Amino acid sequence: MNPLVESLAPIVITGFALQQLLALLEPILEKWLKKNKEWILSMLAFFLGLALSLLLDLRVLRPFGVTRLGWLDTILTALLITGGTKWVNDLSKVINYKKLELRARAQGLHAPASDQVEG
């Protein structure tokens, strides 16, 4: 398996699990949190992401060779975990759009001569 995927997979899985946990807790906490629900759940998610990052020794920058500034790596990892799977979905959309764009360009370069307009 690709070392980058192997390193980032636990962060994605942890983020998904945290997202599911918060989705389960949200209806229960709605009675008590009311109008402050969104920011309280966001803070709860961040602190849980931070705890998971520290307890599981997850680091998002480590696979890229960044070993200095461990505190920053921990915070970035916690933020990615907190984001759940949204960032993964966004990244996969960007990659898919780029792939489609490159495919369209390649097909345009290899268009048959009969498709070209003569002048």
Image (tube, grey):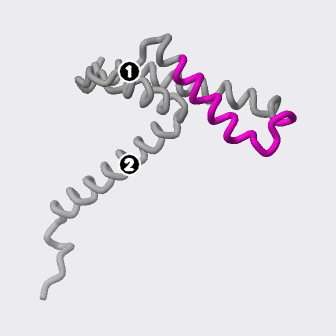
Which numbered disc, 2 or 1, marks the residue closer to the eye? 1
Is 66 located above or below residue 117 in the figure? above
Magenta-drawn stretch, dominant element (helix, strand or loop)? helix
The residue sitting at the bottom extreme is 119
Left or right: 39 in relation to 97: right
Left or right: 23 in relation to 86: right
Is 15 located above or below residue 30 in the figure? above
Q: Residue at x 38, y 28 (%)?
A: 72
Image coordinates of residue 40 in percent, x first then y, are 69, 35
Of callouts 2 and 1, which one flags the residue occurring earlier in the amino acid sequence? Answer: 1
Magenta highlight on residue 108: no
Image coordinates of residue 87 in percent, x first then y, are 47, 39
Q: Which residues are magenta?
A: 30-51
Q: How far apart are the alpha carbons under marks 2 and 1?
A: 23 Å
Q: Residue at x 12, y 88 (%)?
A: 119
Image coordinates of residue 44 in percent, x first then y, are 65, 28
Left or right: 34 in relation to 22: right
Q: Residue at x 17, y 73 (%)?
A: 114
Is 68 located above or below residue 108 in the figure? above
Between 82 and 105, the residue placed more toward the observer is 82
Left or right: 48 in relation to 116: right
Q: Which residue is mark 2?
A: 94
Element marked by disc 2: helix
Image coordinates of residue 30 in percent, x first then y, are 82, 36
Element marked by disc 1: loop
Q: Amino acid at mark 1?
A: Arg
Q: Which residue is mark 1?
A: 59
10 Å crowding of disc 1: few (<14), some (14-19), many (20+): many
